[in-house]
Amino acid sequence: MRQGPEVPAGIDVLLAGDVFADLVFTGLRSAPRPGTETWSTGFAIAPGGIANMGVALARLGLRPAMSAVFGDDLFGVWTWDCLEQEGVDLSSSRRIGGGRTAVTASLVYDGDRAMVTYDEQAVVDVDAMIPADSHPSAAILYLGSRAAAGQWWRTAARSGTRVFADVAWDPSQKWDTALLDDLDACHAFLPNEAEARAYTRTDSATRAAAALAERVPVVAVTRGADGAVAVDQTTGETADVPGVPVDVVDTTGAGDVFVAAFTAASGWDLPLVHRVELSVLCSSLSVREPTGSLGAPSLRSLADWWSTTVTRAAAGEFRAQDLRRRFGFLDDLEPVTVLAAPHAR
């Protein structure tokens, strides 16, 4: 049997993929133009890429392990330390001597963001980094990524691990449907609307979700501020969930937070509509801060949000009353209710 580094027992979710150091500039009035200097009103540095999901999972009380490559430069050392402090296990990750960590600069303006990325594309054998007998209850990866090229996740899926997959933006704009063949080993697929529509050649998130549900048991298609739609073929459930209004600072990594929350909610055996509601809520709350890893809500912050919502609803605030009805299931969700104020339970 192939031997690799050991992942500690008790890991809930195994993630594999690329890690970036995200440099986020918020509050820009416009995109930079050649020959000019543009000032931002906010700035943050945070772990990005697959690290967004690792941090989000840890803050939701799960025990994530992550397999990724880090450079030994300043960004790599700093990102590694940040993830360990957040409670992400890095036993199956690797530092590359002389390597440079991938960096993304995210420029936020006009309610959206543009990104510039540098990545040396380090060649690694992901299968050699992840133990052959590592079979946690769930795994997360990006289809088409270097991490997905290995067999570790297919091996884990055959042993009962539920694989939750996302997909990265296709810079070639070809949207090759052959990529979707990998869904045969996945439990759930969680793309955004633009990606889902492009790969299925459909004209709406709902039609895209229906088409993808023919390939994979569970599908959730995110729609940004408009929420998400989902199909669970294993139970026959469907869900169409609106967004949660918040003051947006930065949407970088919001989709990653959705994936992490959906994975956590699936482990809690929630009905589909509640899995999607909770994921939309976590994703929405994350955009109040720069980057998904900095903005990802913890169980404590979810409990505080719920307590505040209940209080405002009782005071007659219309929007809070609507949220109180939508998220009433949080009253029975133990990971949240044990932390909520007494009047919210």
Image: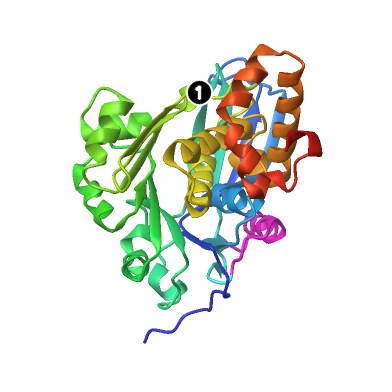
Q: Quadrant where the C terminus lies? A: top right
What residue appears at the point 73 percent right and 44 percent down from the top-left corner? 300
Q: Judge whether 125 appears above or below 342 on screen.
A: below
**Quadrant in the rendering for residue 174:** top left
Left or right: residue 117 versus residue 328 is left
**Residue 48 place in picture, x, y as percent:** 57, 46
Q: Is residue 287 left or right of residue 180?
A: right
Percent x, y for residue 290? 65, 34
198 sits to left or right of 246: left
140 over 316 or under it: above or below: below
Residue type at mark 1 is Ala
Q: Is residue 27 above or below residue 293?
A: above
Residue picked out by circle 1: 225
- The percent coordinates of residue 340 (x first, y second) are 75, 41
Residue at image position (30%, 41%) is 236
Task: Say if residue 52 shows up in the picture.
Answer: yes
Q: Residue furthest right?
A: 342
Magenta residues, as a range? 71-90
Residue nearest the observer in this picture, 119 or 266: 266
Mark 1 neighbour density, 10 Å: few (under 14) some (14–19) many (20 or more): some
Q: Which residue is at a point 25% across and 22% down the rendered structure image? A: 203
Would residue 332 be counted in the magenta stretch? no
Give left or right: position of 298 versus 183: right
Q: Main secondary structure of the magenta part?
A: helix
